[in-house]
Image (tube, rainbow, N blue to C red):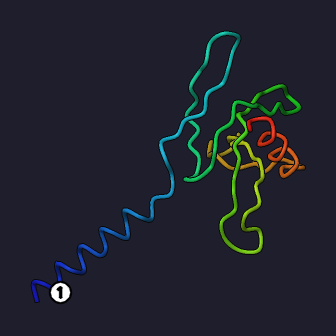
Amino acid sequence: MKKTILTIVLLAMALCATAQEKTADKAYKREGKVFVQSDTQVMKGDTITTYFWRDAQGKEYPIILHRYTKGEKAGRVTAYVVRVSKKSGKEYRYFLPDGEKIATEILNETK
């Protein structure tokens, strides 16, 4: 009985440990000669680039590349930025229009 309970507890702990997708990668924003660290966290496997996207209000966001690993989009790369909702204050991913073209350009320049 003790072995069964111990096995269940260890299995639950392993599932909880692997369920966490976020990493501690931080984005950096360049302001002149100074690099400022933001609190943006990206999903595991995504790459923060040194490129920025500017919205209509002039606010800049670091471009993050996302590589699909499953489904019909597997192997494709697209670009997104992490924005913060004004109402709730939560972060969300905003996939850029023509994100695949942007991601391809960035990847070609960094080779």
Which percent across, then down, holds residue 12?
A: 31, 73
Which percent across, then down, holds residue 43?
A: 58, 52
Image quarter of the C terminus: top right
How many marks the image carries: the answer is 1
Which percent across, then down, holds residue 10?
A: 24, 73
Badge 1 amino acid: Thr
Nearest the eye: 57 or 65: 65
Q: Secondary structure at mark 1?
A: helix
* Residue placed under numbered mark 1 in the picture: 4
Residue positioned 37% across, 62% down in the render? 17
Task: Examine the rendered structure and indicate whether residue 104 appears above or below residue 68.
Answer: above
Q: Quadrant of residue 1?
A: bottom left
Residue positioned 78% across, 52% down in the render? 78
Q: Quadrant of residue 86?
A: top right
Crowding near the residue tagged with mark 1, few <14, some 14–19, many ≥20 C-alpha atoms within 10 Å: few
Which percent across, then down, holds residue 3?
A: 13, 84
Asked if residue 3 lies left or right of residue 32, the reply is left
Q: Which residue is at the far top?
A: 33
Task: Examine the rendered structure and indicate whether residue 25 appears above or below residue 45.
Answer: above
